[in-house]
Amino acid sequence: MTCKCNSTIETVDLSSVNEILDNHLSENSNLITILQDVQESYGYLPRMALSRVSEVTGVKEAKVYGVATFYSQFRMAPVGKYLIMLCQGTACHVNGSGAIELALKEVLGVQEGETTSDGLFTYINVACLGCCSLAPVMMINDQTHAKLTRDKVSSIIKKIRQEEAQ
């Protein structure tokens, strides 16, 4: 059996990580805040970035990785340009999030957690978006879409695809 441990580590420009660390170390920021900013910069947490955070902060790499994988807010792989988060909380579930999930899978052609082949959309389920009165609800990046129906989901995705084609 051959070890392929290093075959999945991508090479990334660490200048953004270094800048983030420079800013945070002077502020005594915590690890979660640093990881949030790294993810904001790269769109996910590259393995090399986690190693650099460990090296500069003195926090063991296993702990950095443990924090990054424990919290659902962190992503360990690149996502599409548009991250779709579908709420699966109680209010959304009762108001039809299951049908909305089926519509998303159909219109995107991917399963939950996958990214479309064009790299535009990644779809994930989340436990709660805190918008219970708007159920069922999804967020696409920072924009909330409420009172969803199958047709509304299809229309939203179609509009984004049209805007991207221009």
Image: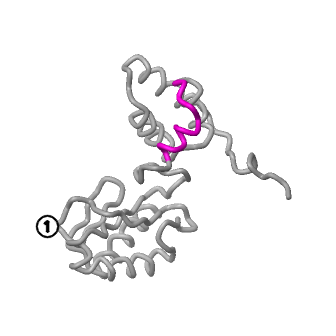
Label 1 Cα crowd, 10 Å radius (few <14 / some 14-19 / many 20+)? few
- The overriding secondary structure of the stretch rendered in magenta is helix
The outermost residue toward the left is 133
Within the image, what quadrant is residue 37 found in?
top left
User: Which residue corresponds to the image point at 19% horizontal and 62% vertical from the top-left?
Assistant: 131
- Badge 1 marks a residue whose secondary structure is helix
Task: Depth check: give the residue in front, 32 or 159.
Answer: 32
Residue 96 location (% of width, % of height)? 26, 80
The outermost residue toward the top is 26
In the image, taking residue 137 as reference, residue 124 lies left or right, namely: right
Q: Which amino acid does label 1 sit on?
A: Ser
User: Which residue corresponds to the image point at 58% horizontal and 39% vertical from the top-left?
Assistant: 62
In the image, taking residue 94 as reference, residue 28 lies left or right, namely: right
Residue 60 falls inside the magenta stretch: yes
Residue 101 location (% of width, % of height)? 37, 77
Q: Quadrant of the C terminus?
A: bottom left
- The span shown in magenta is 57-68
User: Which residue corresponds to the image point at 56% horizontal and 37% vertical from the top-left?
Assistant: 50
